[in-house]
């Protein structure tokens, strides 16, 4: 699994920076965050 630093290191997305759930294969996108649902 490869993480996109450019995504989870964005200063405007501290939550994503902590989760590091983004993948560079295109499976995970801004509109598809199943992991965030479990945090609700």
Image: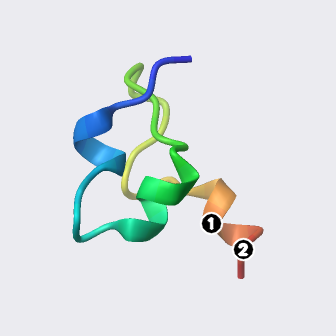
Q: Which residue is mark 2?
A: 39
Residue 23 spot, x, y in % from top left: 46, 30
Determine crowd level at label 2: few under 14, some 14-19, many 20+ residues with C-alpha closer than 10 A: few
Q: Which quadrant would the N terminus be assigned to in this image?
A: top right
18 vs 28, nearest the viewer: 18
Residue at horizontal 56%, vertical 53%?
19
For this orientation, the residue located farthest to the right is: 38
Q: Quadrant of residue 3?
A: top left
Q: Is 31 placed above or below 4 here? A: below
Determine crowd level at label 1: few under 14, some 14-19, many 20+ residues with C-alpha closer than 10 A: few
In the displayed structure image, the side of residue 12 where residue 28 appears, left or right: right
What colour scheme does the image use?
rainbow
What SS does tag 2 mark? loop
Residue 37 spot, x, y in % from top left: 69, 70
Q: Is 27 placed above or below 15 here? A: above
Q: Quadrant of residue 38?
A: bottom right
Residue 9 — which label?
A: none
Residue 28 spot, x, y in % from top left: 47, 39
In the displayed structure image, the side of residue 16 where residue 6 appears, left or right: left
For this orientation, the residue located farthest to the bottom is: 40
Q: Which residue is mark 1?
A: 36
Q: Is 20 placed above or below 15 here? A: above
What SS does tag 1 mark? helix
Query: Is the residue under label 2 in contact with that under label 1 (CB below 8 Å)?
Result: yes
Q: Please tell me how many numbered marks the rendered image carries.
A: 2
Q: CA distance from mark 1 to mark 2?
A: 5 Å
Residue at horizontal 50%, vertical 53%?
32
Residue 8 spot, x, y in % from top left: 36, 48
Q: Which quadrant would the C terminus be assigned to in this image?
A: bottom right
């Amino acid at each position: 699994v490869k993480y996109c630093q450019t995504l989870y290191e964005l200063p405007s997305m501290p939550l994503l920076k902590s989760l590091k759930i983004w993948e560079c294969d295109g499976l995970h996108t801004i509109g598809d965050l199943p992991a965030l649902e479990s945090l609700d």
